[in-house]
């Protein structure tokens, strides 16, 4: 079975910029897209959790999907975030997704209602039978309350329309088990920025992360260097970025990354409730770390 999608490398889970009045900030989104594309990202994920998808209306989501598709204009692959805990409603959204410029759909495990492993298999099978695009599974138990086990993913990998997984359990043993049991052409993406380096050493296919909103070139370079066997160089970049990664998630995502991007002058530091900006203390720490990274050449002056 040949899987119908070829997405590899550094994928950015793009944030959704807002104005101070809470509207989508289209000008800032253009600036951000230009920033990540010039930084060498390999693909873009629109409306993942980092994009604050739970707080957007259907109309806003449609407008975002359309805007990014038009602006990127085929320069890199696009992945649409479409997920939820109502299987029938998610399937309806997928069937109604008409954007031709997208290559796959990223769909998170159902949250709050905590399905069993059998429930996960039936949920994703129902979606995959109906989706017009290949599906990338998204396992993030810290947000959803349920962990999708490797054996479950192996079962789902038998479906021709399920092509990969964003693995954000933080469990390196689980990633090793996925590599052991899954077909070689089934894509595995790191969903934990802090674990990108060791996961790449295990032979994963790329990242879907937050850090690439800020330093896309550096994150892309880690993936490339590891695959070229230049582990010392890749490790140095990874270790240089670790303090920033910790700060970005200290008070939740995307509050941290939006704070960093606002310090860089790319977007405004605006979120939608129930999310709020990070504390002044954390904001100052993020700003100081950005200055250090700028001095090391990771961020252009």
Image (cartoon, rainbow, N blue to C red):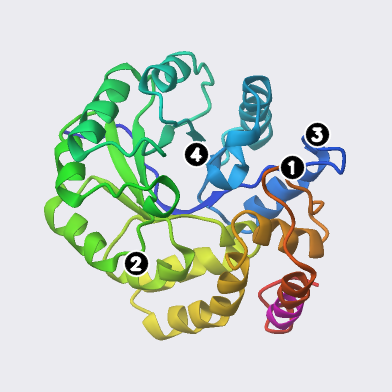
Q: Position of residue 248 (x, y in %)?
A: 62, 66
Query: Looking at the image, is 98 positioned above or below residue 262?
Result: above
Task: Say whether disc 4 or disc 3 marks the residue closer to the N-terminus.
Answer: 3
Foreground mark, 2 or 4, reads 2
- Checking the image for residue 77, the label placed there is 4
Label number found at residue 23? 3
First in sequence: mark 1 vs mark 4: 1
Query: Which residue is drawn at the image coordinates 66% and 74% (left, top)?
Result: 298
Q: Is residue 10 shown left or right of residue 171?
A: right
* Label located before the other in sequence (2 or 3): 3
- Of tags 1 and 4, the one toward the viewer is 1
User: Taken as a whole, is the magenta stretch helix, strand or loop?
Assistant: helix
Q: Secondary structure at mark 4?
A: loop
SS at circle 3: loop
Q: Nearer the viewer, residue 115 or 242?
A: 115
Cα separation between marks 1 and 2: 29 Å
Alpha-carbon span between mark 1 and mark 3:
12 Å
Sequence order check, earlier mark of 1 and 3:
3
What segment is highlighted magenta in the picture?
Answer: 288-293
The answer to whether residue 159 is above or below residue 240 is above
Q: Nearer the viewer, residue 71 or 113?
A: 113
The Cα–Cα distance between marks 1 and 4, rounded to whole angstroms, is 17 Å
**SS type, badge 2:** helix
Q: CA distance from mark 2 to mark 3?
A: 37 Å
Q: Is disc 1 in contact with disc 4, using a CB cutoff of under 8 Å?
A: no
Assess disc 3: are there few (<14), some (14-19) or many (≥20) residues with their C-alpha within 10 Å of its C-alpha. Answer: some
Q: Is residue 190 in sight in this rendering?
A: yes
Q: Determine which residue is flagged by label 1.
A: 29
Q: Which mark is residue 200?
A: 2
Question: Where residue 262 sits: x, y (%)?
Answer: 79, 59
């Amino acid at each position: 079975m040949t899987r119908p999608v070829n997405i590899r490398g550094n994928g950015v889970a793009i944030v959704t910029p807002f104005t101070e009045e809470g509207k989508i900030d289209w000008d800032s989104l253009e600036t951000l897209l230009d920033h990540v594309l010039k930084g060498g990202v390999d693909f873009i994920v629109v409306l993942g959790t980092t994009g604050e998808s739970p707080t957007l209306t259907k109309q806003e989501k449609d407008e975002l999907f359309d805007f990014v598709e038009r602006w990127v204009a085929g320069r890199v692959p696009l992945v649409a975030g479409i997920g939820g805990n109502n299987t029938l409603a998610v399937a309806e959204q997928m069937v109604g997704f008409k954007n031709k410029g997208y290559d796959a759909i990223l769909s998170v495990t159902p949250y709050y209602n905590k399905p069993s492993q059998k429930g996960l298999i039936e949920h994703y099978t129902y979606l995959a039978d109906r989706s017009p695009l290949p599906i990338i599974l998204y396992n993030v138990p810290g947000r959803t309350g349920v962990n999708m086990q490797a054996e479950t993913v192996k079962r789902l990998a038998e479906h021709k329309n399920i092509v990969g997984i964003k693995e954000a359990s933080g469990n390196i043993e689980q990633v090793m088990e996925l590599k052991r049991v899954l077909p070689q052409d089934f894509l595995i993406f790191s969903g934990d920025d802090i674990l990108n380096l060791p996961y790449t050493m295990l032979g994963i296919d790329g990242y879907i992360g937050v850090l690439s909103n800020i330093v896309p070139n550096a994150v892309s370079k880690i993936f490339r260097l590891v695959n070229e066997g230049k582990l010392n160089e890749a490790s140095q970049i990874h270790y240089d970025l670790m303090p920033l990664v910790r700060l970005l998630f200290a008070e939740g995502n995307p509050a941290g990354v939006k704070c960093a991007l606002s310090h860089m002058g790319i977007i405004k530091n605006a979120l939608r409730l129930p999310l709020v900006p990070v504390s002044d203390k954390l904001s100052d720490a993020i700003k100081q770390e950005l200055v250090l990274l700028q001095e090391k050449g990771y961020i252009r002056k």
